[in-house]
C-alpha cells in the first residue's frame, strides 16, 4: 500500500491570483500554471502542494477544511498577512484562544497559531 | 518571515473515528488525542498533519478544500479505500478525468490521482 498526501485543492474564483497570494503568504513558488489549475509549492519536489482550481460557485459558509500556519512570531506574521490582504474573521473563536483566524482574499478561513503550542 | 504550512484542520462530527480512518487510509499514526482535537500525522516530526476537530454543524454541500492522494497504483488504492468505507461521489468530474473522486465516512470529498500525472 502506497498512497501519499499529495495536495490540498482549493476551489476558487481566480486561481492565478489566489495561488500567487498564497505563494507570497508562505514564501512558496508557483510551480505549475495552466488554464484549469495553478499550483503553489515550496519547490517542485516538496509536497503537499496547494492546487487552485476554478469553480463557478462562490464560497458559501465556513469552510469544512482549513489550513493552520505555524509562525515563528504570530503577531508579526498576522500583521504581514494583513498587509497582503488577509482579513480577520469571526468563526466563533474565543478570546482565550491562542490562534488568530484570518481569511484569504476569497474568504477562505485559515489560522495563524502561536509559536508552537500544545496539541498541534 | 517564517511561517509554515502546519496542518489541515477538518471539522467533523466524530474526530477520533475520522482521524483513525484517515490514519489507516494514509498509513499514518494518531500523534495527539484530546477531547477537542485528534491529530493524525506521518510521525511526530512530519508536517503538515491532519487535525480533526468537533463541530456542531453537519457538512453541507461540496467542500471548498479537498485532499488529493497520489498512489502508486490508483485502482488498487481506490479498492483499498473503498474497503475501509470510502464511497464514490459525483462532483461533476468527467469520464476522461484520470482521478477518482471518493468521500470519507463523513462525506468529505478527496481524489485519488493516477500514478503521477501531468500538472500536479
Image (cartoon, coloured by chain):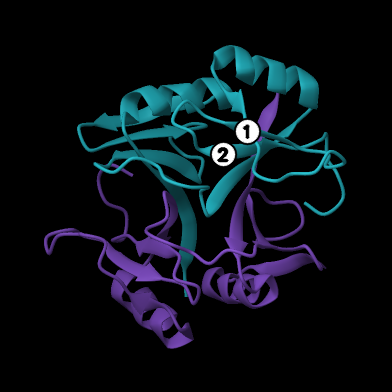
Chain colours: A purple, B cyan
- Which mark is drawn over residue B109? 2
- Residue B32's place in the image compared with A28, above or below, is above
Across and down, in percent, residue B63 comes to 51, 49
Can residue A1 be seen in this snapshot? no
Q: Nearer the viewer, residue B23 or B83?
A: B83
Query: Label 2: how many residues lie within 10 Å, few (<14), some (14-19) or many (20+)?
Result: many
- Residue B70's place in the image compared with A107, above or below, is above
Query: Label 1: how many residues lie within 10 Å, few (<14), some (14-19) or many (20+)?
Result: some
According to the picture, the residue beneath numbered tag 1 turns out to be: B89
Q: Residue at x 39, y 40 (%)?
A: B51
Q: Nearer the viewer, residue B40 or A8?
A: A8
Across and down, in percent, residue B37 comes to 28, 37
Q: Hey, which quadrant is residue B12 in on the image?
A: top left
Labelled pair 1, 2 in contact (Cβ < 8 Å): yes
Which of the two discs, 1 and 2, labels the residue nearer the N terminus? Answer: 1
B64 to the left or right of A90: right
Amino acid at each position: 500500500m502506497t498512497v501519499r498526501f499529495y495536495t490540498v485543492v482549493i476551489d476558487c474564483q481566480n486561481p492565478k491570483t489566489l495561488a500567487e497570494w498564497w505563494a507570497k503568504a508562505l514564501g512558496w513558488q508557483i510551480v505549475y500554471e495552466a488554464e484549469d489549475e495553478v499550483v503553489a509549492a515550496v519547490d517542485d519536489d516538496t509536497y503537499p502542494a496547494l492546487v487552485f482550481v476554478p469553480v463557478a460557485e462562490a464560497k458559501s459558509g465556513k469552510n469544512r477544511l482549513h489550513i493552520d500556519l505555524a509562525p515563528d512570531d504570530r503577531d508579526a506574521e498576522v500583521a504581514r498577512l494583513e498587509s497582503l490582504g488577509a482579513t480577520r474573521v469571526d468563526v466563533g473563536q474565543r478570546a482565550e484562544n491562542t490562534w488568530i483566524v484570518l481569511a484569504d482574499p476569497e474568504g477562505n478561513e485559515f489560522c495563524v497559531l502561536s509559536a508552537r503550542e500544545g496539541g498541534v
